[in-house]
């Protein structure tokens, strides 16, 4: 499998992995290894790691102003960080959805049996 990124989009999997690893350590120490809420904690920390990367990349990509010679119009060029052709900021929202789904499944399994 190949990672296809643009700009600093490669930092996103590193942030998600670091967050998930910290979540794994926290869930193991607080809830125990066989807890049903461990996937929720891990995905929550992975989402926090993704948010950290998105915030960092958003602060560092100020863009560059250039002037079009034909029209004299000012243009703002930005780096456009992406991973698998999806902008990095949308990956955060995808991870939020995954975290909410994991939470729903964990709560359902807790009450179902």
Image (spheres, helix red, strand yellow):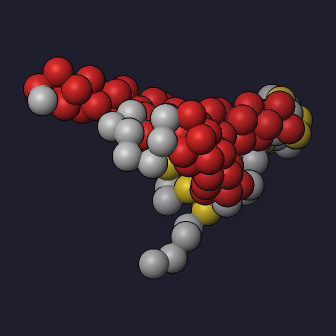
| Count of all numbered marks drawn on residues in the image | 0
- Vertical position of residue 62 compared to residue 5: above or below: above
Residue at the image point whose x is 71% and y is 41% from the top: 53
Q: Quadrant of residue 108?
A: top left
**Viewer-closest of 87 and 24:** 24
Residue 20 in percent (x, y) is at: 57, 48
Q: Quadrant of the N terminus?
A: bottom left
Q: Is residue 62 left or right of residue 23?
A: right
In this orientation, which residue lies closer to the viewer: 8 or 64?
8
Q: Position of residue 70 (x, y in %)?
A: 79, 41
Residue 98 shows in the view: no
Between 76 and 83, the one lying in front of the other is: 83
Q: Residue at x 49, y 59 (%)?
A: 84
Measured as percent of width and height from the top left, residue 2 is found at 51, 76
44 or 86: nearer the viewer: 44
The residue sitting at the bottom extreme is 1
Find residue 9 and report its horizontal and vertical position in percent.
Answer: 66, 54
User: Is 101 situated left or right of 21 in this image?
Assistant: left
**Residue 64 in view (yes/no):** yes
Q: Assign the C terminus to one quadrant of the image.
A: top left
Asked if residue 37 is positioned above or below residue 24 in the image, the reply reads: above
Looking at the rendering, which quadrant does residue 14 occupy? bottom right
Instruction: Identify the residue at image location x=39%, y=34%.
Output: 37
């Amino acid at each position: 499998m190949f990672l296809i990124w643009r700009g600093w989009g490669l930092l996103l999997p590193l942030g998600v992995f670091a967050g998930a690893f910290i979540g794994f350590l926290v869930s193991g120490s607080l809830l125990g290894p066989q807890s049903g809420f461990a996937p929720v904690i891990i995905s929550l920390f992975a989402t926090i790691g993704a948010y950290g990367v998105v915030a960092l990349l958003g602060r560092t990509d100020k863009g560059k102003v250039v002037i079009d010679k034909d029209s004299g119009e000012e243009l703002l060029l930005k780096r456009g960080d992406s991973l698998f052709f999806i902008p990095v900021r949308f990956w955060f929202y995808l991870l939020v959805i995954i975290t909410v789904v994991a939470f729903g499944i964990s709560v359902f399994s807790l009450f179902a049996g």
